[in-house]
Amino acid sequence: MVSSDIKYRNYMHDIYNTFSPLNWLLEIFSLDCIRSEDNKKSKSYWVVFRNVLTASFLTGVNIYTLYYKFNWLYSNLVTSVIYTDVLQMVYDIFQYIVDLYFAHKYGSDVFHEYVLHYAYIDGTFGTEYYSSVKKRITKVMIFIISMWGSSNLCDFLIWGNGLGFLAASVFSVAYVYMLIKILTNLHVTLHVLQIESRLRVIGDLIQDYYCGSVSCTARIEDAVIKKNWFYYHKTKLSSQVHPVTNVCHQDSSDVKRLSRCYLLLTEQVYFINRMFGLRILLNCLSLLIDMVRFTNLTVRILLGTQHTGYTQAFFPSISTFWRSLTCIIVIVSLVNHCEDTYRQRERIIALIQHLVMNRTLDEKMLAAYIELRGLVQSQPINFHMAHLMRIDYPLLISITSLFVTYTIILIQSI
């Protein structure tokens, strides 16, 4: 078993380290995954207590702010704004409790096994891309959290100056829930990057072997090795890969190892879908509600039907629209990273097709690559929302359609 092999410990440490940029923020809301070796009985009780305490605190804050709004603030708001605000507050706490449940269910031992699978794959490849994954998630984090921080700060200052900072503070609870949704989204993105980086390595290995093998014909244009075409990019795997120490001299057993690694990656995707499928569905619905209510509020401010405390509607409308734009960026970022992963799978299939058609392979190698191609085609990498919707570009079209529909319905009530 992988868990009994000591040589994978360094890989596991490096894999855990790729989660470090995000983990300290997840820990604030008890959404981090605990390592198996830390899961003693007392630690397990502490994790449950921490989850209950965090959920109870946020629920109490929600109840108090709702009470305060109904008694002192909602009288100054139009009906549609009140309804969407109450709906969002109730929905947010429900979604957070669901997040806690899945983080606890698939954390600890299950998550440790998940990391062990990656350690086996990385031990087979012998490559190191941990720093790349860490840098990529850090850049995404900085960009999205900067958008969240700047939009909320401007929103708080503008509305505080117009309606009073006490009222702005009561409504600022929504900023915390927006951060929770962003962190969940970033957590999924990090797992998607883990899959995408390993699919890229499989494609690089196949491409390196293709470039070093003998062509079966010199008459046909070779698209794979052309510098200005879609497949070409420099790789440094030839000197790094272990146990495939020389990709130009692969045998069928090496290709079998690639097949086993890909099959194990499909299991990793299964874990990701189990852990995040329902959470991302609720997350996207929540962000959709946010987008609709922010746009509805922006339109009402511009038309003058919503009191803001300002003689001009420019500043409140801009700050509210900025928050809506943040929601859009969060959804688009996740979808774009999932699509990048799908492209890596398509690249593997295309490279194998070129290899089979344009290179001279012995019977065993040909059979091994055809088997790998069949596996990749029959077991696609798909990230989905509780088996209801695939996370891809068509999803953005569906969300846009819903957003426009419900926004029009709300605006028609003006």
Image (cartoon, grey):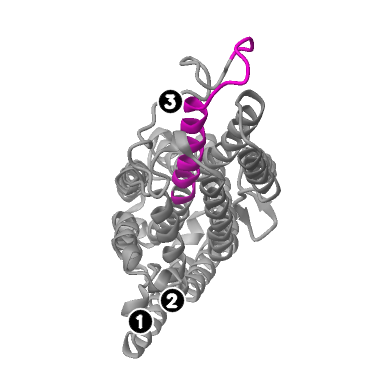
In primary-sequence order, the first of circles 1 and 2 is 1
Q: Amino acid at mark 3?
A: His
Rendered location of residue 120, percent (x, y) = 43, 60
- Residue in the image at 39% along x and 31% along y: 235
Residue that mark 3 sits on: 233
- Residue in the image at 70% along x and 56% along y: 388
Residue that mark 2 sits on: 109
Q: Is residue 154 or residue 176 the one in the foreground? A: 176
**Residue 354 appears anywhere in the view:** yes
Provide the secondary structure element on which disc 1 rests. loop
Residue that mark 1 sits on: 39
In primary-sequence order, the first of circles 3 and 1 is 1
Rendered location of residue 116, percent (x, y) = 42, 65
Q: Amino acid at mark 2?
A: Asp
Mark pair 3, 1: CA separation: 43 Å
Extent of the magenta region? 194-221
Quarter residue 121 falls in: bottom left
Dominant secondary structure of the magenta stretch?
helix
Q: In the image, 338: left or right of 310?
A: right
Quarter residue 17 falls in: bottom left
